[in-house]
Amino acid sequence: MKLTNLLLFAGAAAASYHLVKNREDITEEVSETSQLLKKAQLSLVNIQANLDYLKNQKETLEDISKDLQYKVKVFNQEAHARLTEIQQIWENPSNNK
């Protein structure tokens, strides 16, 4: 039992020594990790804002697309009606005088 306690104490002492010896490196690593975490959080906020913007633009583009589809449909109907009228004029020129 005393040997186990002695080994645990020696291990804890060795770990403490290495921590104290490397405290500057450890502190620097923690500081860098903290800065990276802050940058990652800021990037996440920016990405979310960009996604929200793109979502709004998508909805706007969908509305514009529907409007254009309607206008193309109306244009095609008008063009077809006018072409039919022109064909009738060419086929029966005497009826249009």
Image (cartoon, helix red, strand yellow):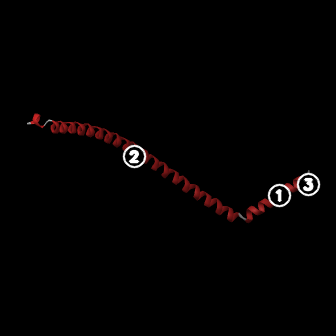
Horizontal arrangement in the rendering, residue 63 relative to residue 40 (left or right): left
**Contact check, label 1 and label 3, Cβ < 8 Å:** no
Residue bearing the label numbered 1? 11
Give the labeled residue for mark 2: 57
What crowding class fits label 3: few (fewer than 14 Cα within 10 Å), some (14-19), or many (20 or more)?
A: few
Residue 88 x %, y %: 17, 36
Question: Gap in Å between the C-alphas at discs 2 and 1?
Answer: 61 Å
- Estimate the spatial distance between the alpha carbons at disc 1 and disc 3, rounded to whole Å: 12 Å
User: Which of the two residues, 6 or 35, is positioned nearer the viewer here?
Assistant: 35
Check disc 2 and give the amino acid type: Gln
For residue 3, which numbered disc appears in the image? Answer: 3
Q: Nearer the viewer, mark 3 or mark 2?
A: 2
Q: Is residue 69 left or right of residue 51?
A: left
Label 3 and label 2: CA atoms lie apart by 71 Å
Q: Nearer the viewer, residue 26 or 61?
A: 61
The amino acid on which the numbered mark 3 sits, given as a three-letter code, is: Leu
* Left or right side of 47 for 78: left
Q: Residues within 10 Å of mark 2 (few under 14, many from 20)?
A: few
Residue found at the very far top of the displayed protein:
95
Residue 89 position by quadrant:
top left
Tell me: residue 90, above or below residue 32.
Answer: above
Q: Contact (CB < 8 A) between labels 3 and 2?
A: no
